[in-house]
Image (cartoon, rainbow, N blue to C red):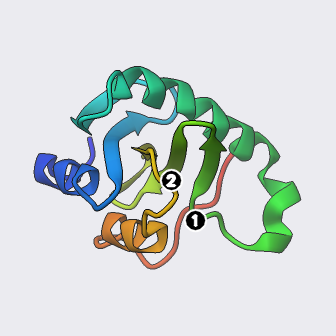
Amino acid sequence: MSSLAVGDIHALAAFDGIQGCSLVVSESGLVIQAAGEFPDVEYLSEAAVEFWRVYTRQHEYFEALGKLNLIMMAFQKGWLAVTWCASDPTLLLVAVARSQSVDWPGWLRRARMSAPPERPEATN
């Protein structure tokens, strides 16, 4: 289980512009914790894991870009971000925002506050 505290997921969900945030098991899509005001953030987070799975299957094609920090997706009515959990690489953090004006690098720094020096490599 992750060492990410319940307060941390609430702090990530309360980050300026973020409307919802979840901690999700990358293999199963099981939502462990969720916070924020976005309706059905749990269902959205469970589905967002599929984007991570595509990356893990195809990661070698992206190596020229360096290590993955954040998967960002822009939709008509909002933004979705998926990243690995610093305290447990088998878990993912998913964030939902309605505005593109979120300080995503700042959110990512906040999410990585307890990050190990290097992220484990993706596996097939």
Q: Earlier in the sequence, mark 1 or mark 2?
A: 1
* 89 left or right, relative to 52: left
Residue 58 at x, y percent in the picture? 81, 46
* 14 left or right, relative to 97: left
Q: Is residue 26 above or below residue 118?
A: above
* 47 left or right, relative to 13: right
Q: Nearer the viewer, residue 93 or 81?
A: 81
Q: Which residue is mark 2?
A: 83
Q: Nearer the viewer, residue 82 or 75?
A: 75
Q: Residue at x 29, y 70 (%)?
A: 114
Q: Nearer the viewer, residue 78 or 93?
A: 78
Name the amino acid type tagged 2. Thr
Q: Residue at x 81, y 66 (%)?
A: 63
Q: Nearer the viewer, residue 40 or 65?
A: 40
* Spatial CA span between label 1 and label 2: 6 Å
Residue 69: numbered disc: 1
Secondary structure, mark 2, is strand
| Mark 1 touches mark 2? (CB < 8 Å) | yes
Within 10 Å of disc 2 (Cα), the crowding (few <14, some 14-19, many 20+) is: many
Q: Is residue 69 above or below residue 98?
A: below
Q: Is residue 64 above or below residue 41?
A: below
Residue 23 at x, y percent in the picture? 34, 40
Residue 64 visible to the viewer: yes
The quarter of the image holding the C terminus is top right
